[in-house]
Image (cartoon, grey):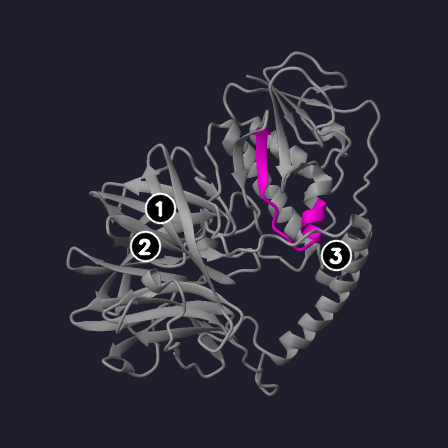
Amino acid sequence: MRLRLTIGASPLRRWHLLLIDRLRSLPGLELSLCLPESAPVDGSGLGPLFRVEGLLHGLRPDSLFAVAEPGDAAVPISRQAGPVDLVLDLGDGSVAEAGRRWTLHFDGKAGEDALVAALLGGGIPLVELRESGYVVAAGRPGSENGRILLAKLDDILARIVTLIVAAMAGGRLHVPVLPANETGPPTPPAAPAGIAKTVVKAGIGKAIELVYRTCFHAPHWRVGWRKLDGPDLFTLQRHPDSGWTDLPDDGTRFYADPFPILHKGRVTLFVEDFAHAAGKGIISAVAFGPDGPLGRPEPVFEQPGHLSYPFVFARDDEVWMIPESCSAARVDLFRATAFPGGWVKEATLIEGVVASDATLIEQDGRWWLFATVRDGGGSFSDALHLWSAPDFRGPWTPHPRNPVLIDIASARPAGRMVLRNGELLRPVQDCRQGYGKALGIARVTQLDDTGFAQEVETILEAGGPLWPGRRLHSLNSAGGFEFIDGSAMVRRNPLARR
């Protein structure tokens, strides 16, 4: 296929070069770049803001939005349109060309100005590739850097590259419709006013962050639990009237990612145990009696790198765990030899990927592994990949449509999936307003070799008397207990070592 990229009135930027480099790896693609006769001027107006953010946060100036040199494109460059099979228009769509054309839209508008306006307005844009009004592929890219526009823009541009490459490779990317009570993204302000306002907010925000981190541990998570004497959250789709009981910590550490398991008649809860002084997570466990925890979590599993999300399950009369260790760029399987400790590595399931929150489900004699993957850059939470295997030990085969979903609102796993009335329900993280900000419950409507689809049925948030705080992050249950986690505010001890 002969593919030509056009960028319209935008300058050639580093994310265009990244896209070109990724597209060149696709087999059977003849790629060229069409540039205007004279180099366009960068009219985004973001330079002052990026300089301020760079100084405040120590960011490098070579972002994906930075202007690039045409000589770095490494593909043939033309100044006039010629016959091709497909035009990929990354501009505002104003250049008329005959033949097939894909255009890039942000919240329904083409061009980088629409992307900038959405971000300045505090929103997460819906990104669409369209051909003659038909949506070829769509995604909601996101970022863990919601307060820093330069970093947020970099993350979203990196995932736009992922979306375009996946669509060119035949992917069928579409995002689920969110529940009807969702208000949607805020209306973006006019660009000049938005930039000036954002520059001021950047300085104020940095000052507030410094004060907060001086006085409080950040982040500090907490685990909530309750006895299940009625419907669970999958059925309620709201916080229970009884609220939640906190799993206590001593303030020098936090507990997160609660994964309970019923083993030999007793519930044991595994958690990420993060000591602020060490700056690293380990896995700890605590047994539960009829009325709650019997003591405090004690360390059961530690490695040189950070560990979290202890996905624990029983199979073949053994207890197994897949902890998240994305810094190692692999997914490992461990077995307990002295439950709840004695964890030994049994296999590496997946290598060479930065995968977050690996979650398994067995369905019709086949195993599926869900995880979000950081595709060379961008967010850790918005690109869902699948693998399948005849056995949980492997061998694992990547889904031919990976990534099967790009959605900061519903891609990242948030706990075990459950089967209800023949339907697969999965808890998901809604990170549109920040990492772990809200919890969604999605119903999987397709899971096979041809693709994946889900419908988000509800989104649960933190705040209010039933679950105070600003975050709601995960959901799991076992043996008559249900667990969630979220955020807490804990003051620093000014005499403690840092």
Secondary element under disc 1, as helix, strand or loop, is: strand
Spatial separation of the CA atoms under disc 2 and disc 1: 10 Å
Magenta-span inclusion, residue 127: yes
Q: Looking at the image, can residue 303 be seen?
A: no
Secondary element under disc 2, as helix, strand or loop, is: loop
- Amino acid on which the number 1 mark rests in the picture: Val
Residue furthest out toward the top: 83
10 Å crowding of disc 3: few (<14), some (14-19), many (20+): some
Part of the protein shown in magenta:
116-130
| Residue depicted at x 44% and y 76% | 466
Quarter occupied by residue 323:
bottom left
Secondary element under disc 3, as helix, strand or loop, is: helix
- Amino acid on which the number 3 mark rests in the picture: Gly
Would residue 449 appear left or right of 62 to someone viewing this image?
left
Magenta-span inclusion, residue 151: no
Total marks drawn? 3
Read off the residue under disc 3. Answer: 54
Read off the residue under disc 1. Answer: 444
Q: Nearer the viewer, mark 3 or mark 2?
A: 2
Give the numbered dot on residue 417: 2
User: In what quadrant of the picture does the C terminus appear?
Assistant: bottom right
* Towards the viewer: 445 or 334: 445
x, y (%) of residue 391? 23, 45
Seen in the picture, residue 162 relative to 413 is either above or below; the reply is above
- Amino acid on which the number 2 mark rests in the picture: Met
| Residue depicted at x 57% and y 72% | 218
Quarter occupied by residue 157:
top right
